Image (tube, rainbow, N blue to C red):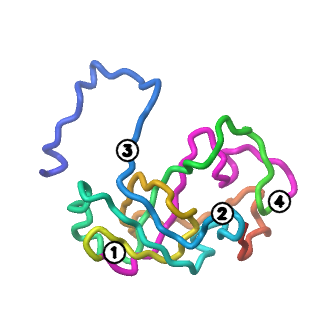
Amino acid sequence: MEIMKREIKDIEKRKFPKKISLKPIGIIHTRFKSLKGIPIQSSLSESNGTIEIFPEYQAGLKDLDGFSHMYCLYFFDMVKLPVPLISKPFLDNESRGVFAIRTPFRPNPLGLSILEVQGIKENLIHVKNVDILDNTPILDIKPYISEFDSIESYKIGWLKGKIEKRIS
């Protein structure tokens, strides 16, 4: 169905949700069985993995193989809540606000990685640049499109001069 012909709920009756619940669309299989040794960002990883999309969502993979990279949105299911709103990041000795760092320990423990699509066979997406713990629930995937998604940063806050290839 065309996106512009899709209907949304009545905007006049809109209520802000107090709770949001999501259903995983798949699971990722990686070599990372603990937090130790996981690359701190997907762009710093050379590791491969496989995303298994559940059968009821497999049809949604149509045409994804035409893209070199994809966003992968996932749920850090191993994080114990609540989490502190200030903590020390990997690349600094000073504590920072959770929204100024990329820690998995967040109020809503969501992860976002840009993964290279190596190939798709049936419901399996073979990916590279993995920085995700084995058996992590996958919430969504979207194609990465450099013409839309690439923005040259001119301010990187407290990270200036601290970025290098690192693992946890």
Decide: is 68 above or below 141. Answer: below
Which type of secondary structure does the marked residue at label 3 adopt? loop
The CA span between labels 4 and 2 is 22 Å
Marks 4 and 2: which is nearer the front? 2
Q: Earlier in the sequence, mark 3 or mark 4?
A: 3
Residue at the image position 52 percent from the left and 70 percent from the top: 30
Which residue has dot 1 on it?
67
- What residue type is disc 4 on? Asp
The CA span between labels 1 and 3 is 25 Å
Q: Quadrant of residue 81?
A: top right
Q: Is residue 58 left or right of residue 45?
A: left
Q: Earlier in the sequence, mark 1 or mark 2?
A: 2
Q: Which class describes the residues within 10 Å of circle 4: few (<14), some (14-19), or many (20+)? A: few
Residue at the image position 69 percent from the left and 60 percent from the top: 156
**Residue 59 badge:** none
Which residue has dot 3 on it?
23
Where, quadrant-wise, is the C terminus in this rendering? bottom right
Q: Is residue 124 left or right of residue 40?
A: left
The CA span between labels 3 and 4 is 35 Å
Q: Position of residue 82 (x, y in %)?
A: 67, 35
Marks 3 and 2: which is nearer the front? 2
Which type of secondary structure does the marked residue at label 1 adopt? loop
The CA span between labels 1 and 4 is 35 Å
Q: Position of residue 164 (x, y in %)?
A: 74, 75
Residue 114 counted in the magenta span: yes
Q: Nearer the viewer, residue 156 or 98?
A: 98
- What residue type is disc 1 on? Phe
Residue 29 counted in the magenta span: no
**Residue 34 badge:** 2
Which type of secondary structure does the marked residue at label 4 adopt? loop
Q: Position of residue 128 (x, y in %)?
A: 49, 77
Q: Which class describes the residues within 10 Å of circle 1: few (<14), some (14-19), or many (20+)? A: some
